[in-house]
Image (spheres, coloured by chain):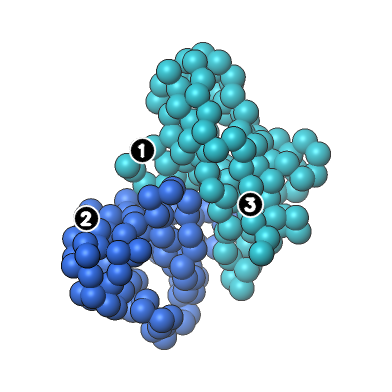
Chain colours: A cyan, B blue
Amino acid sequence: EPEVTQTPSHQVTQMGQEVILRCVPISNHLYFYWYRQILGQKVEFLVSFYNNEISEKSEIFDDQFSVERPDGSNFTLKIRSTKLEDSAMYFCASSSDTRPVNTEAFFGQGTRLTVV
Amino acid sequence: AQKVTQAQTEISVVEKEDVTLDCVYETRDTTYYLFWYKQPPSGELVFLIRRNSFDEQNEISGRYSWNFQKSTSSFNFTITASQVVDSAVYFCALSVGRSYNTDKLIFGTGTRLQVFP
């Protein structure tokens, strides 16, 4: 069964450092998402990406964040200068379509980011 | 604005009991989609069900069943004869699906279900 793959599963970084979270979406999917879940809290939308550009972003997704699809298979989330409050589980998701019959986002297993 | 409310933060039951997880949603859109995801202790999000706003038929899948009622804006989830492996956090989510290029999910705060042997 196809799946979304995220690496690494856990990353520890020092405050102020740049971090890149990597995702390999399902191969024929066209829509890509990043979500964040601070420990014990709800899952929050960060950004959606389609046709090589951001289609929607939340208030959380400020200038410190960027996304890229560098090579047609990977989808990355970069945090330029990490803060303690960026510590969270980051989920990548992809879907084949936004139309009703295909509105199911497949989630990766998550990357737990710990900023120290 | 869209919103999902899961008023139950934590529920504890003993194995074999039935349990219902409540979900109330808010949206002004007439076309929308409702989801349930399970998050086991390992942390991943496991898709359970998707329901669109035009289909109010209840659904049953094994021990799981879902009751969608537009009149009360609710999409409740019942586990029959609960098992220890059902212990997880369960999230209800909403998508309004109005945009051609984005389909973000709006999650509730989750309900932690603990099933004791």
Numbered disc 3: secondary structure: loop
**Closest to the observer, A34 or A40:** A40
Q: Which mark sits nearer the N-terminus, 1 or 3? A: 3
Q: Quadrant of the N terminus of chain B?
A: bottom left
Residue in the image at 42% along x and 41% along y: A37
In which chain is the residue bearing label 1?
A
In 3D space, how far apart are the residues under numbered discs 1 and 3 (Cα atoms)? Answer: 22 Å
Counting from the top left corner in percent of width and height, residue A61 is at 52, 33
Residue in the image at 69% along x and 46% along y: A24
Numbered disc 1: secondary structure: loop
Q: Are marks 2 and 1 on the same chain?
A: no
Instruction: Please identify the residue farthest to the right as the structure is shown.
Output: A71
Left or right, B109 with reference to A60 = left
In which chain is the residue bearing label 2?
B
Counting from the top left corner in percent of width and height, residue A14 is at 49, 15
Counting from the top left corner in percent of width and height, residue A59 is at 47, 36
In 3D space, how far apart are the residues under numbered discs 2 and 3 (Cα atoms)? Answer: 29 Å
Q: Which residue is mark 3?
A: A4
